[in-house]
Image (cartoon, coloured by chain):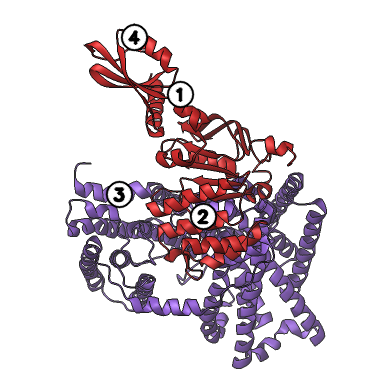
């Protein structure tokens, strides 16, 4: 590689060759699937060309993750944390005998070509064959322009920590608006593409100035926001009491490092949720159309505000599963995870605690996170329903008509308790992933949890459309339940055998698990209409979603990771 | 009179036939090592020789793939509480949580160690000039090392483990660390295991030194014995020689022409006779510092490996 230009161009490929190869593999797989699957196999859909579930699957399940990865690779997000003030441009290149415009030009050109190319590839070989006719040229130009601006901002030093994250979010939000505008207004492609293309040289200029500043160490610094933040931070209550036990001390550590962000994120979700709730009933009525009979039936039983409340109540357990990946982490002890190596951080590893106690400390933090998150949710949902008057519509829901007020009260109380326990179980179910100390596993599981549920949900939906599919689904569910229970037996036996837990305690935990599962099945089957959702489906979903093996595996995985 | 209980005769750390492989790299190769009670045990070796891997086995952070590791007679993997509550450790990275304040860290550490002494911790904090309300991330590297030392010493651990504690630190902090080692051994029965490649430091405080190179223990003996057995002999030959003679016990030769100097680890009298048998005469004999011994030993191992 004799040319500096080639060397610069090759750095992204050398660093991300595995990820980029996987992206290419995903494209090939979905393109072949789209090409060779007959259109009728994608299931029923409206005749007017509106979006079918399969379109969401190909758009969000494959294109979005791939394009996100490509953009992240080209903004060099692994060379510097984006929340920091420093440039994310690789520092080692600053000492190369190359002018700044050349240094900047190659990754920008590559990124523009690559992102535009990804769109063209998906649009022509994936989306069009499955019947989603989206424009070819202007989205490609839009992606190229957006990537150029994301690069320019990422490589420009910012005066305050986290300011860059804000500016990047603004760019992403602007993209959404531009895309919406482009789809609604029929602007000629030539004008549209010219306007977008003009943004790229502008971003190039910003990037040159930014990288040149970073190269000469000219990072601007606003000290006042940092001073204000320090005053706020120092005025927050501090831990001044002694810890009664090592377990309590460890739980405090885990709370400060990983727990505190969970209720914080729930609060952010609730801030977003309230305006959606206020605008929501109309959209619910639109969505719950005859084409979606199940959703329509549930909305009819619960009323639109009721469906929204159910949506909020379902959010926490689902979200907690994702947060559990981080709560179980042992790779770092307070700073960002960027440079964390595989394994167990020595600060945690050398604490005189058993593996079981370290897991227990995390479980205690999970209790605190769960209670605080639900406390926040109830504190926001209750007043919102009361102040908007939506509680009247909620109370008049057909599903409640057949029960006395006393039964409704008991049912809601029992449902709330079960939901809290279920949320905690979801949070601790994925502790084992973080406890493994394997960054690749953590990242892969995060992608799987985020993305793979879509094809699975789609497959279930597709199978439910066909009588033979329902039988297949039932057989699959029975097999999955069997595998889950057998694996649980093996893990519990190993826990007892290694003396990580006592046999009576393991039996007690299993009994509690059964009680919660039965309770959830009872409540869910009462809430959902029986003619649409059979009891077997409820039982299968609850048993498969109720964490069991993850819990049992957590101390075993930590023991492996801590003493490799 | 204190009864000579069996535990007191046992070494604090007993490593037997331990090998460790990371994928294709053999990091420890059949290592057997014993750290006696009440000594300062220096573990020396070049970068990547296996010092940290060995210390991780002592702390239970790595499980022995073969052989056994016992600390205070216990397996650190099977009984982390029993072992780690008696060990104070300070590592090269000294990775303390930056968000914690000094007093928060002291409060956090206290419940883990039954022997934690508030008075001693406070004494150390004042001696090191650490403000209790300052966050660790706001401290200099040297001050962070002092915080690490504080929490490693405040419970008067029976074994102090220091993994490259002075790396990248200024002389003042290094002085504090050496002072801590001296303070620790001043308390009867306590032991220090420390790794370093700053050999002058090791030489100043260690009673016993083990050298590890490419995962193998090259030598392991009391420092006085090492000094006594390693000598530098300068041999003058009547005619210039392109290469020195091959003599048993010589670790390394330096020089050219008629005058060659040998670092040897053998009986100097016997070696003198052997050199004279090749036509040379010993014109000078010197004691060696640990640094010279280390360089000669490492070179000898490398030469053997090449052969």
Residue at the far front in the pictured view: B1
Q: Which label lies toward us, 2 or 3?
A: 2
* In the displayed structure image, the side of residue A108 where residue B124 appears, left or right: right
The residue at 56%/64% (across/down) is B122
Kindly report the distance in space between the C-alpha atoms of the residues bearing marks 2 and 3: 42 Å
| Cα gap from disc 2 to disc 1, whole angstroms | 35 Å
Mark 1 or mark 4: whose residue is earlier in sequence: 1
- In the rendering, at what x and y percent does residue B121 appear? 57, 61
Instruction: Tell which circle, 2 or 4, labels the residue nearer the N-terminal end.
Output: 2
Q: Is residue B25 visible?
A: no
* Sooner in the amino-acid sequence: mark 2 or mark 1: 2
Name the element at disc 3: helix
Residue A11 badge: 3
Name the disc covering residue B276, or none: 4
Q: Colour of chain B?
A: red
Residue on which disc 2 sits: B149
**Quarter-wise, where is residue A376 in the image?**
bottom right
Residue at image position (48%, 76%) is A233
Question: Looking at the rendering, which quadrant does residue B259 occupy?
Answer: top left
Image quadrant occupied by the N terminus of chain B? top right
Chain name for mark 1: B
Q: Residue A493 location, x and y as percent? A: 76, 46
Chain holding disc 3: A
Above or below, comparing residue A315 to residue A303 in the picture: above
What numbered label is drawn on residue A236?
Answer: none
* Residue density around tag 3, few if under 14, some if 14–19, many if 20 or more, within 10 Å: few
Relative side of B223 to A159, left or right: right
């Amino acid at each position: 590689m004799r040319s500096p230009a080639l060397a610069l161009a090759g750095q992204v490929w050398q660093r991300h060759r595995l990820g980029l190869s996987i992206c290419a593999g995903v494209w090939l797989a979905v393109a072949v699937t789209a090409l060779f699957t007959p259109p009728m196999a994608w299931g029923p859909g409206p005749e007017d060309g509106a979006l079918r579930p399969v379109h969401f699957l190909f758009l969000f399940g494959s294109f979005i993750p791939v394009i996100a990865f490509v953009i992240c690779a080209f903004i060099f997000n692994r060379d510097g944390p984006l929340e920091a003030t420093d440039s994310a441009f690789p520092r080692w290149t600053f000492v190369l005998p190359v002018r700044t415009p050349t240094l900047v030009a190659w990754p920008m050109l590559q990124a523009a070509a690559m992102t535009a190319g990804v769109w063209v590839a998906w649009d022509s070989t994936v989306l069009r064959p499955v019947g989603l006719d989206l424009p070819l040229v202007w989205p490609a130009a839009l992606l190229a322009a957006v990537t150029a601006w994301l690069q320019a901002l990422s490589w420009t030093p910012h005066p305050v920590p986290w300011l860059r994250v804000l500016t990047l979010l603004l760019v992403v939000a602007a993209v959404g608006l531009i895309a919406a505008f482009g789809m609604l207004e029929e602007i000629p492609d030539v004008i549209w593409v010219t306007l977008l293309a003009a943004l790229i040289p502008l971003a190039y200029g910003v990037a040159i100035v930014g990288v040149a500043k970073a190269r000469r160490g000219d990072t601007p610094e606003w000290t006042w926001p940092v001073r204000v933040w320090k005053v706020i931070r120092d005025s927050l209550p501090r831990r001044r009491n002694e810890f009664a036990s090592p377990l309590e001390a460890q739980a405090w550590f885990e709370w400060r490092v990983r727990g505190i962000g969970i209720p914080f994120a729930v609060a952010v979700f609730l801030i977003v949720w309230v305006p959606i709730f206020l605008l929501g009933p109309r959209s619910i009525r639109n969505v719950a159309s005859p084409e979606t009979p199940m959703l329509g039936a549930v909305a009819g039983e619960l009323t639109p505000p009721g469906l929204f409340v159910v949506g909020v109540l379902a959010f926490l357990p689902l979200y907690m599963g994702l947060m559990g990946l981080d709560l179980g982490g042992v790779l770092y002890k307070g700073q960002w995870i960027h440079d964390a190596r595989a394994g167990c951080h020595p600060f945690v590893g050398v604490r005189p605690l058993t593996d079981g106690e370290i897991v227990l400390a995390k479980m205690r933090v999970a209790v605190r996170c769960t209670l605080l998150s639900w406390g926040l949710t109830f504190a926001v949902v209750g007043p919102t329903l009361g102040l908007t008057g939506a509680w009247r519509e909620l109370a008049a829901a057909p599903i409640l008509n057949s029960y006395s007020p006393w039964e409704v009260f008991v049912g809601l109380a029992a449902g709330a308790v079960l939901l809290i326990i279920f949320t905690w179980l979801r949070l601790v179910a994925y502790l084992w992933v973080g406890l493994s100390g394997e960054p690749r596993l953590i990242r892969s599981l995060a992608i799987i949890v985020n993305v793979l549920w879509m094809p699975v949900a789609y497959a279930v939906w597709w199978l439910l459309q066909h009588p033979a599919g329902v039988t297949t689904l039932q057989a699959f569910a029975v097999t999955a339940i069997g595998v889950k229970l057998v694996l649980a037996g093996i893990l519990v036996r190993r826990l007892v055998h290694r003396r990580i837990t006592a046999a009576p305690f393991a039996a007690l935990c299993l009994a509690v698990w059964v009680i919660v599962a039965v309770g959830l099945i009872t409540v869910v089957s009462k809430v959902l209409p029986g003619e649409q959702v059979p009891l077997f489906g409820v039982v299968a979903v609850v048993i498969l979603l109720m964490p069991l093996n993850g819990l049992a595996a957590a101390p075993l995985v930590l023991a492996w990771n801590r003493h490799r | 009179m204190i009864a000579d209980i069996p535990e007191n005769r046992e070494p604090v750390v007993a490593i037997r036939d331990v090998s460790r492989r990371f994928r294709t790299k053999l990091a420890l190769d059949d290592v057997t090592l014993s750290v006696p009670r009440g000594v300062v045990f220096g573990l020396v070796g070049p970068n990547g020789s296996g010092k940290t891997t060995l210390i991780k086995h002592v702390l239970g952070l790595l499980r022995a793939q073969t052989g056994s590791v016992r600390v205070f007679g216990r397996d650190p993997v099977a009984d982390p509480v029993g072992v780690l509550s008696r060990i104070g450790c300070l590592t090269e990275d000294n990775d303390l949580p930056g968000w914690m304040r000094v007093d928060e860290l002291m409060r956090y550490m206290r419940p883990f160690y039954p022997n934690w002494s508030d008075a001693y911790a406070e004494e150390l904090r004042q001696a090191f000039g650490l403000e209790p309300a300052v966050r660790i991330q706001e401290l200099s590297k040297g001050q962070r090392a002092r915080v690490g030392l504080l929490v490693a010493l405040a419970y008067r651990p029976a074994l102090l483990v220091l993994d490259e504690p002075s790396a990248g630190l200024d002389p003042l902090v290094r002085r504090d660390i050496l002072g801590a080692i001296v303070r620790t051994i001043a308390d009867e029965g306590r032991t220090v295991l420390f790794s370093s490649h700053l050999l002058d430091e090791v030489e100043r405080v260690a009673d016993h030194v083990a050298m590890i190179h490419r995962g193998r223990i090259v030598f392991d003996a009391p420092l006085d014995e090492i000094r006594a057995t390693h000598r530098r002999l300068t041999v003058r030959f009547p005619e210039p020689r392109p290469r020195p003679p091959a003599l048993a016990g010589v670790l390394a030769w330096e020089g050219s022409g008629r005058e060659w100097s040998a670092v040897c680890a053998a009986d100097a009298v016997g070696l003198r006779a052997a050199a004279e048998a090749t036509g040379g005469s010993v014109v000078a004999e010197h004691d060696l510092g640990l640094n010279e011994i280390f360089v000669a030993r490492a070179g000898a191992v490398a030469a053997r490996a090449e052969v």
